[in-house]
Every structure is written in structure tokens, then in C-alpha cells.
Image (cartoon, grey):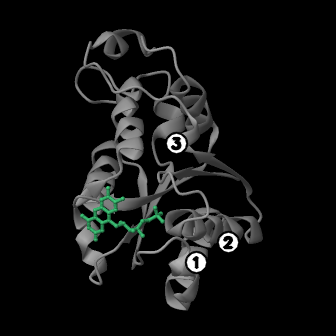
């Protein structure tokens, strides 16, 4: 099993990063090989809606997303961690998610070439917000859950937590446990 972690905050060592690292520890304990990508260290331009990828399955933008797309195709599960910015996801994560267009044809069906690899792939989410109510992140959960539903990926669920200062989440034992369990679930043998 390969589990890919996608980190959507610029704060390396921050709350999203801590939760994702914990999730990847859970996946590793379940026997998976894990890899973490820090989106802020990559060059990922915004989708241009040129529709070329709908036909070719190849994005016209030559940046770091093509390598990440390969890693997504190879992974059995993809776990995303992201902070809430203005009741939405960080710009790094949004640019990344919009570039998933490359996986689809003009009818929003998987490209034939990637269908066997993407269908049923496991996908999960970890969110952090400064608001004491972790449901402030509901719009982000909606984006990822709907993406999973539309594409028949296997939705693993979301861990939603509150924290403000960098690394503050380390004091939230319940969130760390939930993150670890999500990671374990992402790498569990097929039922
Ligand atoms: C630009 C920006 C916008 C933010 N907007 C919100 C918001 O709308 N709601 C909220 O609860 N927290 C908001 N926050 C707080 C972050 O979600 C919070 O500090 C979080 O712990 C950051 O996670 P990180 O350490 O992974 O970067 C915002 C922070 C920044 C920098």
C-alpha cells in the first residue's frame, strides 16, 4: 500500500502538518509506504480551463503538478491536510485540487487511461481552523467529499479540528488520535 499525504499549509510544522504527519504515522503502522508533499514548496499554477486535458489527458501547464499527478495515480490512498482560510481552503490546496481536471474528460468522467487507477482510490481529509467550532471547515469537507462521490473514489472521512498558533494542535490528543486512525484506515487491507 502507498499512502500519499498532501500538505496544504505554508506553515511547515504547523497544525495541518502535525495532523498529516500523525495520519501518515498511522498509515505506516498499518504497513503502508508513505510520502508527504508540501504544496507550498511546489510550483502549481491555477487551472486555465483551456479544456485541452479533457481530450489529451495531459495538462498544458508545465509545472510541478505533473509529477504530483503521477504520485496520485500510483497511490492507493491520498490524504489531504489543509487550514481554513476565509471559510475556505488555502490557495495552495485550491490550485492543486483544480488541477485534478487533468484526470477527467469533457463529461467529468475519468480519462480512460486513469480510470482503473483512480476509481475506488481512497481519499481523506484533515482540516484545521482558528474558530473554536471545527465545522467552520464544512465547505472544505464538502469540496472533497463531493469530488469523491462524483468520481466513485472511496471517501475515508474527515478529521476536523480547531487550533490557531503554529503547532497548537499538539495539545489536542483527541484530534491526534483521530488523525492517526484515519491514516490507519487509509492503509487497511481491502475488506
Ligand atoms: C489568511 C488566513 C485566513 C484565515 N481564515 C480563517 C477563517 O476564515 N476561519 C478560521 O476559523 N480560521 C482562519 N484562519 C486561521 C487558521 O485556519 C488557523 O490558524 C490554522 O490553525 C492554521 O493552520 P496551519 O498551522 O496548518 O497553517 C486563517 C488564517 C489565515 C492565515
Q: Distance between the Cα atoms at labels 2 and 1?
A: 6 Å
The correct choice, above or below, for 41 with respect to 78 in the image is above
Q: Position of residue 137 (x, y in %)?
A: 28, 67
Disc 2 under 8 Å from ligand 1? The reply is: no
Quarter placement of the C terminus? bottom right
Q: Nearer the viewer, residue 51 or 168?
A: 168
Q: Secondary structure at mark 1?
A: helix
Which label belongs to residue 181?
A: 1
Q: Is residue 77 left or right of residue 155?
A: right
Q: Position of residue 142 (x, y in %)?
A: 24, 59
| Residue receiving disc 3 | 40
Q: Hey, which quadrant is residue 59 in on the image?
A: top left
The residue drawn where x is 59% and y is 57% is 12
Q: Position of residue 37 (x, y in %)?
A: 61, 45
| Mark closest to the chain's N terminus, 2 or 3 | 2
Q: Distance between the Cα atoms at labels 3 and 1?
A: 26 Å
The residue drawn where x is 31% and y is 21% is 105
Query: Where ligand 1 lies, by image quadrant?
Result: bottom left
Q: Secondary structure at mark 2?
A: helix
The residue drawn where x is 43% and y is 56% is 154
Q: Are marks 2 and 1 in contact (CB under 8 Å)?
A: yes
Mark 2 Cα-neighbour bin, 10 Å: few <14, some 14–19, many ≥20: many
Q: Distance between the Cα atoms at labels 2 and 3?
A: 24 Å
Disc 1 under 8 Å from ligand 1? The reply is: no
Q: Hey, which quadrant is residue 140 in on the image?
A: bottom left
Q: Secondary structure at mark 3?
A: helix
| Residue receiving disc 2 | 26
Disc 3 under 8 Å from ligand 1? The reply is: no
Q: Position of residue 32 (x, y in %)?
A: 74, 59
Report if residue 168 is visible in the image: yes
Amino acid at each position: 500500500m502507498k499512502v500519499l499525504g498532501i500538505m496544504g499549509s505554508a506553515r511547515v510544522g504547523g497544525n495541518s502538518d502535525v495532523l498529516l504527519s500523525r495520519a501518515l504515522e498511522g498509515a505506516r503502522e498499518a504497513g503502508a509506504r508513505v510520502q508527504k508533499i508540501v504544496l507550498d514548496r511546489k510550483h502549481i499554477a491555477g487551472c486555465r480551463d483551456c479544456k485541452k486535458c479533457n481530450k489529451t489527458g495531459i495538462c498544458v501547464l508545465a509545472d510541478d503538478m505533473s509529477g504530483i499527478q503521477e504520485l496520485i495515480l500510483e497511490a492507493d490512498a491520498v490524504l489531504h491536510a489543509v487550514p481554513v482560510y476565509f471559510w475556505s481552503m488555502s490557495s495552495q490546496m485550491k490550485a492543486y485540487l483544480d488541477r485534478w481536471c487533468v484526470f477527467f474528460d469533457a463529461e467529468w468522467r475519468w480519462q480512460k487511461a486513469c480510470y482503473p487507477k483512480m476509481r475506488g482510490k481512497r481519499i481523506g481529509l484533515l482540516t484545521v481552523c482558528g474558530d473554536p467550532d471545527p465545522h467552520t471547515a464544512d465547505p472544505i469537507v464538502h469540496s472533497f467529499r463531493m469530488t469523491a462521490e462524483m468520481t466513485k473514489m472511496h471517501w475515508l472521512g474527515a478529521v476536523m479540528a480547531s487550533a490557531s498558533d503554529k503547532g497548537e494542535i499538539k495539545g489536542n490528543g483527541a484530534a491526534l488520535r483521530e488523525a492517526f486512525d484515519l491514516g490507519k484506515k487509509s492503509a487497511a487491507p481491502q475488506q
